Image (tube, grey):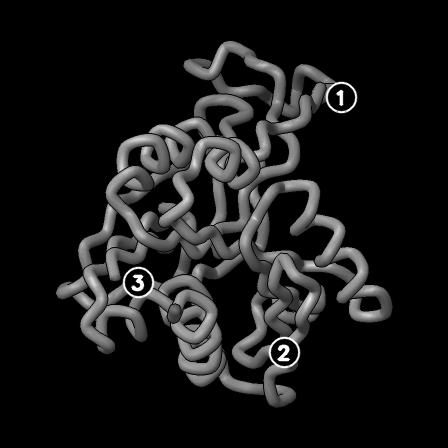
Amino acid sequence: MKILVTAGPTREPIDAVRVLSNRSSGLMGVAVAAEAAQRGHETTLLLGRGATHRPDASIHCRPFDTAAELADLLRTCFPQADMLIMAAAVADFIPEPTDRGAKMSRHDGPCTLTLHPAPDLVADVAAGKRSDQTIIGFALEPAADLPERAAAKLAQKGLDAIVANPLEAMESTQISGMFISADGQIVYAPTDLPKNKFAIWLLNQAEQFCSP
């Protein structure tokens, strides 16, 4: 298959030197891309520049900073893909545009940031996907109601499946997640898998999900 993977955080500029971002390391998405390439899939990785993990040089990688840049890459790359695995941690909010060529100073006193909801990139992509394409999203939610919240996101965004992870997965090297398909089936991963082992488990689920 031709597999498109997104990974890492978006970074939205506040001024010339500051950004609004999140704690995503990119480890999960990079591990998924590496496993997909290892299996012989034609793999493209869209990776946030703020990610602390980097892929092997053999993986075709295209960088992004902002949600808008990632959206442009998705528009370019997704039409050629059979599967999108959307592991990137995309901003939920974007700062209102300011003079980004300048640097705010603490000596100017308190400042207020106005945040606007960011576009839902994976939902936008899903709205235009072909019947021969598969989109697998990610949900990071509190462990107590993880399956319910993830299933609701899957339906709202029009995805084929979603990988649900507890909040503790952020910045962790281990993960206890589940694979939820649009028909309501839930497959639980073994608990506390290292993320490279979870990537193997996830690709197994994705390949089975797409098999005739």
Numbered circle sitting on residue 206: none
| Callout 3: SS | loop
Q: Is residue 34 visible?
A: yes
Q: Earlier in the sequence, mark 3 or mark 2?
A: 3
Q: Identify the residue under disc 3.
A: 54
- What's the amino acid at mark 1? Pro
Residue shown at the point (24%, 77%) measured from the top left: 39
Residue picked out by circle 2: 187
Q: Position of residue 170 (x, y in %)?
A: 61, 64
Element class at badge 1? loop
Judged by depth in the image, the label closer to the viewer, 3 or 2, is 2
Quadrant showing the N terminus = bottom left
Q: Nearer the viewer, mark 1 or mark 2?
A: 2
**Above or below for 10 versus 112:** below
Of the pair 192 and 200, the residue shown nearer to us: 200
Distance, label 3 to label 2, CA atoms, is 29 Å
> Could you give the CA–CA distance between mark 3 and mark 1, rounded to whole angstroms?
37 Å
- Pointer 1 or 2: first along the chain: 1
Q: Residue furthest right?
A: 144
Residue drawn at (41%, 31%) of the image: 71
- Marker disc for residue 110: 1
